[in-house]
Image (spheres, grey):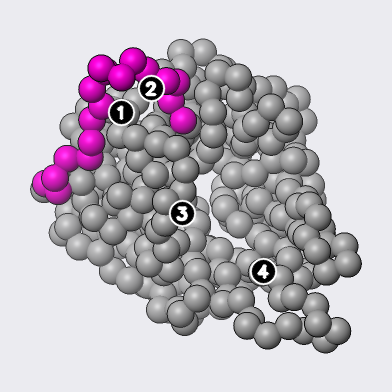
C-alpha cells in the first residue's frame, strides 16, 4: 500500500497490478497509509486543497492535515482524527497492536502577526475511543512501533540535524541509535517483524568520484506474498540530496548500508515474514531482499510517502 499522484494505491505483487483506492480533488494529497492490525482498514493522512482566498481580516490560509480511515477495498472513507486548529497536522500514523490508538507525528505552525515564525512537532499517542492527545516525544517525527508495541523508534530533531532514536512505547528511557553526526537526513524508520532490526533512509557519506553507483534497474517481473502493499503518492518533485537505505540492530549495533540507489526520499517497509523490503521513492516502487540483494522495479510511479505491507491476518 502506498501513495502516488496524490492518492492511495494497493499493489498485488503476485498479479503485478495496482489498484487506486482514493480519488481526490486536484490539489488534495493522501499519504502515509497504514494497515490496521487485522488488515481490514487503512488509515492515511489527508491534506485538502489550500484555499485560494484569504480569510477574515486578510489572514492567509494555513494548511491542515487530518487522518482518514477506509476499508481495505477503499470503501467507507471517513475522517478519523481532525485537525484542532489552522496550521495543524496529523501525519505518519501507526496503529497500536490492539488497534485502540494511533501513534502519530503531530505538528502545529506558530504564527505571529500573520507570519509563520516556527513549527512545533512531536510524536504523540491519540486514543481512537476519545480522549486527549498524549505527547510521547517532543521535537520528534516519524514514529515506528515494534511489533509487540513495547518500543518506539522515531526521528529526533535537534540543532545537529536528525538522529534515529529509540524509547519505551511511552517515550521514556530514550537513547540515540544513529546520531546525525554519523549520517545526514535520517528518516522513515521501520522495525522488522521480529523487532530486532530497524530499516531507515539517510544521505550516505561522500565517496570518491570514481566509485560506481547503482541506478534502479529497468522494470522486471517479480513476486512476493499476496496482496498487500499500500502507498500514498504525494506529487513528486526534486526533494533533496540522493539517499539510500540503511539497517541497524535495535540495540544500535551493526549499522550497515543496504543500497546504492541515490534515490529521491526513499522509504521502506518490511514483508510480514521479514524476508523482503519494499521501497517507495521519487523514481518508483521497488522490491529487494532484506539483505539488499535481488533488486527489482515494481512500478515506475514514485511518491513521497510512507508505505505499508499488509499484515499476515488471513484476510484476502
Q: Earlier in the sequence, mark 1 or mark 4?
A: 4
Q: CA distance from mark 2 to mark 3?
A: 21 Å
- How many residues crowd mark 2 within 10 Å: few (<14), some (14–19), many (20+)? some
Q: CA distance from mark 1 to mark 3?
A: 20 Å
Relative to 81, is 118 on the left or the right?
A: right
Q: CA distance from mark 2 to mark 1?
A: 8 Å
List the residue tagged with mark 1.
260
Tell me the magenta residue range.
203-220
Q: Where does residue 229 sit, x and y in percent of width and height? A: 34, 54
> In the image, is residue 154 part of the stretch drawn in magenta?
no
Q: Where does residue 190 sit, x and y in percent of width and height? A: 49, 37
List the residue tagged with mark 2.
257
List the residue tagged with mark 3.
305
**Residue under the point 78% across and 60% down:** 116
Farthest-out residue, left: 221
List the residue tagged with mark 4.
64
- How many residues crowd mark 1 within 10 Å: few (<14), some (14–19), many (20+)? some
**Residue under the point 78% across and 52% down:** 118
On the rendered image, what quadrant is the C terminus found in? bottom left
Residue in the foreground of this view, choosing between 246 and 143: 246
Amino acid at each position: 500500500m502506498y501513495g502516488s499522484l496524490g492518492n492511495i494505491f494497493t499493489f498485488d505483487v503476485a498479479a503485478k497490478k495496482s489498484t487506486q483506492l482514493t480519488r481526490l480533488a486536484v490539489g488534495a494529497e493522501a499519504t502515509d497509509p497504514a494497515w490496521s492490525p487485522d488488515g481490514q482498514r487503512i488509515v492515511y493522512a489527508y491534506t485538502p486543497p489550500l484555499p485560494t482566498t484569504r480569510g477574515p481580516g486578510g489572514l492567509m490560509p494555513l494548511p491542515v492535515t487530518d487522518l482518514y480511515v477506509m476499508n481495505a477495498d477503499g470503501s467507507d472513507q471517513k475522517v478519523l482524527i481532525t485537525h484542532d486548529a489552522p496550521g495543524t497536522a496529523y501525519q505518519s500514523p501507526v496503529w497500536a497492536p490492539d488497534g485502540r490508538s494511533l501513534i502519530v507525528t503531530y505538528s502545529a505552525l506558530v504564527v505571529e502577526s500573520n507570519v509563520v515564525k516556527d513549527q512545533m512537532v512531536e510524536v504523540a499517542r491519540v486514543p481512537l475511543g476519545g480522549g486527549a492527545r498524549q505527547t510521547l516525544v517532543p521535537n520528534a517525527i516519524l514514529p515506528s512501533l515494534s511489533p509487540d508495541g513495547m518500543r518506539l523508534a522515531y526521528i529526533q530533531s535537534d540543532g545537529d540535524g536528525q538522529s534515529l532514536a529509540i524509547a519505551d512505547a511511552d517515550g521514556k528511557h530514550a537513547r540515540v541509535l544513529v546520531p546525525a553526526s554519523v549520517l545526514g537526513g535520517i528518516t522513515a524508520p521501520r522495525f522488522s517483524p521480529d523487532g530486532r532490526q530497524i530499516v531507515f533512509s539517510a544521505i550516505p557519506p561522500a565517496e570518491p568520484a570514481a566509485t560506481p553507483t547503482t541506478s534502479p534497474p529497468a522494470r522486471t517481473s517479480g513476486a512476493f506474498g499476496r496482496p498487500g502493499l499500500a502507498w500514498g503518492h504525494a506529487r513528486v518533485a526534486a526533494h533533496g540530496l540522493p539517499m539510500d537505505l540503511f539497517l541497524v540492530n535495535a540495540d544500535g549495533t551493526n549499522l550497515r548500508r543496504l543500497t546504492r540507489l541515490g534515490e529521491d526520499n526513499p522509504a521502506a517497509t518490511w514483508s510480514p515474514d521479514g524476508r523482503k523490503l519494499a521501497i517507495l521513492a521519487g523514481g518508483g516502487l521497488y522490491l529487494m531482499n532484506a539483505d539488499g540483494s535481488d533488486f527489482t522495479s515494481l512500478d515506475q510511479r514514485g511518491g513521497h510517502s510512507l508505505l505499508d505491507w499488509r499484515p499476515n491476518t488471513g484476510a484476502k
